[in-house]
Image (cartoon, grey):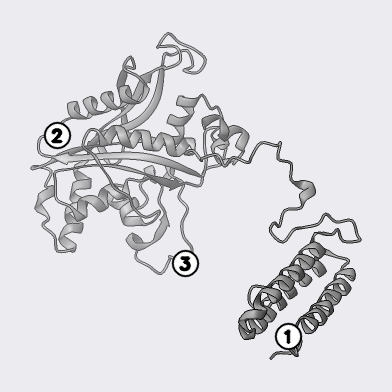
């Protein structure tokens, strides 16, 4: 028998009365000394602990050894002792703190049943994520698969394979964030934060034979100063289609359908000549203003058109870089011979599309974390 369990000389009524009277006295004495919530919790654990509480230990020792005829009397006295412990716990402590019952850890004084319950509202996608998913779905419905790639890229996949050779002036338009301690590596293997999602196009062509149709959403990084329309971190969606006899007409039809699916059937598209190192010919795409229907307003600078994305036919130099890399990796290099296949590519900024769709004037609001702004899209 442990020291915590009083000695019970017999199971006769006088012996039971004396033993339980001593226990009631101990409960009264110890509870009278309680002055803080911490002391009350210690008192509760000492008497009502599930494994080592005194009531459990006494009940296990006395009830198990009791003869059958004494168990009823013992049980009645045991229940009275437990009620005395519960009553002691219900009393307020002298410092005025609200009492806590054994069954609840919530102070009674703070529980107002007339108040409405707390409702956990379900979350909604961030407006950038929602826009990205909407665009991916448009191309998914056209049979495009989704490909992803690393944000830390090599110079080869980010620039060289895309017809940006070293010292090419077009690199100046993408102020790149380079990783430290790369000078000891070969130029093509130096690591940087990708400036566009185009490296995934190269990786996909190196790993897969044509035909292929992919759309590539993802985060990109450039050393741009933050202002109302620029951010050093932003998101792109790019697409690539490669196969036999793919023409610029296929590109125009694909993008015209995508813009109508995204902005409405009344939206018109038009293409202007442009330059990108990895496409030839290249074009900028504009859509008729979704705010004024093309009549001209402040948001479209009274032109009736909004510039939205860039596109073009895949430059043969890109196919040549893919062919060389496939040969280096032991894959069939001839499947991307520009005399056998052609392709088109396009790319657009997710933030720009989200700003147009939701009428947001400052790109920084998407990254501010201000719930007053984000809750508008819930």
Q: Quadrant of the N terminus?
A: bottom right
| Picture coordinates of residue 198, whole percent (x, y) | 32, 45
Secondary structure beneath disc 2? loop
| Picture coordinates of residue 139, whole percent (x, y) | 27, 34
Left or right, 214 with respect to 134, comes to left
**10 Å crowding of disc 3: few (<14), some (14-19), many (20+):** few
- Looking at marks 3 and 1 on the same chain, the residue that comes earlier in the sequence is marked by 1
| Picture coordinates of residue 127, whole percent (x, y) | 48, 35
**10 Å crowding of disc 2: few (<14), some (14-19), many (20+):** some
Secondary structure beneath disc 1? loop
Instruction: Determine which residue is flagged by label 1.
Output: 5
Q: For residue 12, what is the image quadrant?
A: bottom right
Residue depth check, mark 3 versus mark 1: number of the one nearer the observer:
1
Residue at 19% over, 47% down: 319
Left or right, 241 with respect to 34, comes to left
Instruction: Determine which residue is flagged by label 3.
Output: 181
Instruction: Determine which residue is flagged by label 2.
Output: 246
Residue 326 higher or lower than 287, as above or below: below
Q: For residue 137, what is the image quadrant?
A: top left
Left or right, 210 with respect to 162, comes to left
- Looking at marks 2 and 3 on the same chain, the residue that comes earlier in the sequence is marked by 3
């Amino acid at each position: 028998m442990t020291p915590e369990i009083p000695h019970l000389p017999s199971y006769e009524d006088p012996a039971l009365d004396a033993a339980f009277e001593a226990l009631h006295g101990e409960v009264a004495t110890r509870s009278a000394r309680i002055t803080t919530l911490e002391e009350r919790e210690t008192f509760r654990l000492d008497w009502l602990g599930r494994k080592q509480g005194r009531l459990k230990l006494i009940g296990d020792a006395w009830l198990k050894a009791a003869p059958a005829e004494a168990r009823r009397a013992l049980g009645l006295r045991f229940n009275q002792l437990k009620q005395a412990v519960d009553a002691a716990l219900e009393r307020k402590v002298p410092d005025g703190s609200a009492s806590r019952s054994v069954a609840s850890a919530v102070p009674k004084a703070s529980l107002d049943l007339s108040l409405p319950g707390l409702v956990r509202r379900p979350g909604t996608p961030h407006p950038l994520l929602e826009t990205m998913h909407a665009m991916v779905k448009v191309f998914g419905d056209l049979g495009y698969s989704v490909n992803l790639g690393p944000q830390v890229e090599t110079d080869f996949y980010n620039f060289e394979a895309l017809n940006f050779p070293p010292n090419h002036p077009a690199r100046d338009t993408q102020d790149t964030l380079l990783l430290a301690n790369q000078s000891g590596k070969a130029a093509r293997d130096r690591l940087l934060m990708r400036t566009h999602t185009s490296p995934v196009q190269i990786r996909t062509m190196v790993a897969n034979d044509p035909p292929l149709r992919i759309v590539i959403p993802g985060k990109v990084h450039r050393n741009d100063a933050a202002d109302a329309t620029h951010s050093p971190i932003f998101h792109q969606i790019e697409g690539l289609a490669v196969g036999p006899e793919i023409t610029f007409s296929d590109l125009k039809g694909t993008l015209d359908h995508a813009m109508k699916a995204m902005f409405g059937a009344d939206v018109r598209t038009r293409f202007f000549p442009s330059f990108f190192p990895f496409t030839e010919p290249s074009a900028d795409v504009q859509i008729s203003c979704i705010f004024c229907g093309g009549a001209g307003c402040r948001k479209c600078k009274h032109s009736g058109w909004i510039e939205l994305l860039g596109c073009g036919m895949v430059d043969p130099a890109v196919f040549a870089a893919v062919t060389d890399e496939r040969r280096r990796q032991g894959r069939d290099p001839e499947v991307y011979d520009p005399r056998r296949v052609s392709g088109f590519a396009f790319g657009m900024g997710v933030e720009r599309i989200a700003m147009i769709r939701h009428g947001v004037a400052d790109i920084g609001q998407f990254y501010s974390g201000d719930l007053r702004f984000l809750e508008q899209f819930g």
